[in-house]
Image (cartoon, rainbow, N blue to C red):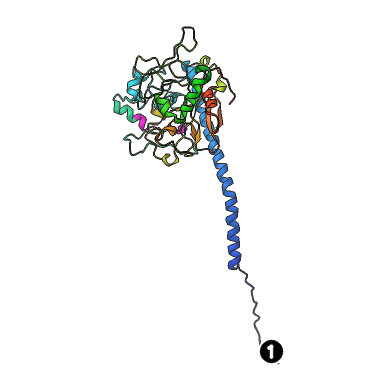
Amino acid sequence: MMRPHVRKQHVRNCKAFTLVELLVVIAIIGVLVALLLPAVQSAREAARRTQCINQVKQLMLAMQNHVGARKVFPSGGFVSNPDLIDYMSGGKPAGPKTQGLSWAFQLLPYIEEDALHSAPQNSGATTRQAITDLLENSKVDGFYCPSRRGPTRNSHPDRNTQNWLIDYAAAHADFTRSDIGDATFDMMLEDARWCKARFVWAGLVNFNPFGSEVKRPVLTPSDPRRDYVGYWGVIVRSNGNTAQRFYTPITFARITDGSSKTIVLGEKRLQPSEYDTGNFEDDDKGWSDGWDWDVIRYGLCQPEQDGMNNPPTGQGNSIRASTFGSAHSGVFTAGFADGSARGMEYDIEPELFNRLCHRADGEIVSP
């Protein structure tokens, strides 16, 4: 008897994740991402900080080349918000002694930006507005810390200009104990809590970017400080187009504390909320500014990380405008007169930091 043909059915056992298993897998992936993300961010920040250090080294190399070409370090300019046309000679930008624009402008030929430095005469621009526009519309990539921002223009609503900004500033040193004695220095150090308030208006050192008066100490003709007019850093104020005697030509011979122990410039402290816009007081005119907060900072103020502390009541942005600092955690980068660049800790004593910024106080310290 014939049996009917029976088709065999192969049952396929299909397996799948249950909802619980899927949630467990997602949770594990989330934990791994949470563990890896800080490491990735740390690696990226380390790379950005390395780039920042290299940029400071390039600026210090440019300083060396400036000294080689002109026999002196660049000056710090003359006043805030200068117009280049006021500091040109024979159609060319004036030299360090009379240049009103900053050290950053004076370094342009030595950081492969000679075309920008020479733009006024090469472009045929002769009017004040035309020359101003040339500078306001020109960015320099190496002037920005990558941990903070890329090339940025001032877009602060209180200013009509849109200058390209800068993240580095030269060091302006104050007196040290060997200059004025312990009692006077201790009083001055206490005063330095207010940084800019003392920096601008106190009688011992008058930085005042908007004025011309400088208190001169009483010195004998044989005193090596006889040409001192209030500027003890490597970058000093120029005479501008006046008969003032601010400027002292700074050569390596004048850095008697040693070029490897004297800070020339460093990163400046800013507010994170204003990275993209600039700030009216200390981050608006940028690299084309003169003797002003944008490109000059004070050695006797405590360096701080960006956005760490608010200024004292009644002082507005004064402390931030005077201090060095950076977006990096723990350290900011400083460039030394020998061409090196090193990280400096934020908790460095202000007196020690000021001594490092002073070129010739005789109180040699190791950074």
- Residue 175: say if magenta: no
Location of mark 1 (residue): 3
Quadrant where the image shows the C terminus = top right
Residue at image coords 60%, 68%: 18
Residue at image coords 47%, 22%: 174
Q: Position of residue 97 (x, y in %)?
A: 41, 16
Instruction: Name the residue nearer the viewer: 114 or 209.
Output: 209
Instruction: Relative to 177, say whether 152 is above or below.
Output: below
Q: Position of residue 61 (x, y in %)?
A: 52, 24
Secondary structure, mark 1, is loop
Q: Position of residue 277 (x, y in %)?
A: 39, 39
Left or right of 294, for residue 52: right
> Is there any visible trace of residue 111 in the rendered image?
no
- Residue 141: say if magenta: yes
Left or right of 360, for residue 229: left
Instruction: Name the residue nearer the viewer: 74 or 213.
Output: 213
Instruction: Relative to 29, say whether 173 is above or below.
Output: above
Quadrant of residue 348 within the rendered picture = top right
Q: Amino acid at mark 1?
A: Arg
Instruction: Relative to 125, say whether 1 is above or below.
Output: below
Total tally of numbered discs in the picture: 1
Magenta highlight range: 134-144
**Residue sitting farthest toward the bottom:** 1
